[in-house]
Image (cartoon, helix red, strand yellow):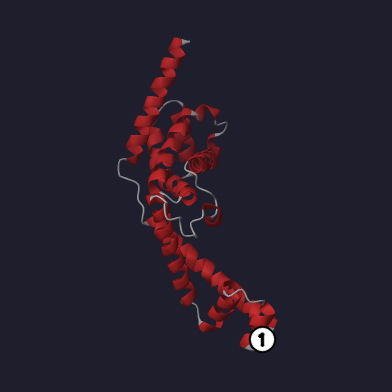
């Protein structure tokens, strides 16, 4: 979207033009959904947060000082709502804090079991990615980051200098990061918002506007 076109759409939306805001939703919905999904790791929750983010943005457009700052403003709304949702759901920022890398207790419910299976699947995928590295890079990564050997001991075991080992570790981690990012992107791309997402958001915006109007009439 061109900057001038975006500013014009935001300006019209501030004036109450829901058609303009619907166009904004269509152009930003995947970005907003993706931002929420990265925090929540749950497509259904992310979709709810994305819809709430657009309704909140529409309701608060008058607070937006400059139309050109709409994208980071919308991103901040999405992030805050996603973090609030994660807190409400008892989801934490790291796998260790959430305990998804540990086996749930015997009396754990289906949600904990689902998280365990998800963590197992992720761990298996990471192991597959590590195995896909060349032997030159795979051995240093495995020895230092899985077997927890010191760089000195790993270098001695492989018969190379510590400097050479560190270089291989650096290259190996870089390749791992690239492949894990690609894996995550494919995972996120597997989720798609429903075709009527923008329409449902606009319905929510109109309901919010109607409720605000009624509140104003009662005052």
- Left or right, residue 198 beside residue 63: left
| Quadrant of res 24 | top left
For the point 55% across and 54% down, the residue is 94
Q: Which class describes the residues within 10 Å of circle 1: few (<14), some (14-19), or many (20+)? A: few
Instruction: Residue 65: give x, y in percent of width and height.
Output: 57, 31
Is 154 left, or right, of 88 in this rendering?
right
Position of residue 43 measured from the top left corner of the image (x, y, whole percent): 39, 49
Is 11 in front, or is 207?
207
Residue found at the far left of this picture: 195
**Residue 123 position (above or below residue 219):** below
Which quadrant holds the N terminus?
A: top left
Look at 46% across and 66% down and name the residue there.
123
**Nearer to the camera, 207 or 3:** 207
Q: Position of residue 135 (x, y in %)?
A: 52, 83
Residue matched to label 1: 156
Please identify the quarter of the rendering in which residue 47 is found: top left
């Amino acid at each position: 979207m061109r900057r001038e076109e975006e500013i014009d759409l935001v300006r019209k939306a501030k004036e109450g033009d829901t058609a303009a805001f619907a166009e904004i939703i269509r152009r930003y919905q995947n970005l907003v959904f993706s931002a929420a999904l990265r925090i929540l790791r749950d497509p259904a929750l992310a979709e709810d947060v994305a819809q709430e983010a657009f309704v909140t943005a529409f309701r608060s457009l008058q607070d937006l000082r400059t139309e050109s700052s709409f994208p980071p403003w919308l991103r901040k709304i999405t992030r805050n709502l996603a973090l609030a949702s994660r807190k409400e759901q008892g989801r934490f920022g790291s796998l260790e804090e959430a305990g998804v890398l540990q086996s749930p207790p015997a009396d754990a419910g289906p949600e904990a079991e689902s998280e365990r299976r998800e963590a197992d699947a992720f761990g298996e995928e990471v192991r597959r990615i590590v195995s896909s590295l060349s032997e030159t890079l795979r051995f240093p990564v495995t020895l230092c980051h899985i077997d927890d050997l010191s760089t000195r001991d790993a270098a001695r075991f492989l018969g190379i200098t510590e400097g050479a080992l560190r270089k291989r570790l650096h290259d190996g981690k870089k390749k791992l990061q690239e492949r894990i990012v690609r894996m995550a992107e494919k995972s996120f791309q597997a989720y798609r918002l429903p075709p009527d997402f923008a329409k449902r958001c606009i319905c929510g915006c109109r309901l919010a506007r109607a409720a605000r109007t009624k509140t104003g009439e009662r005052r």
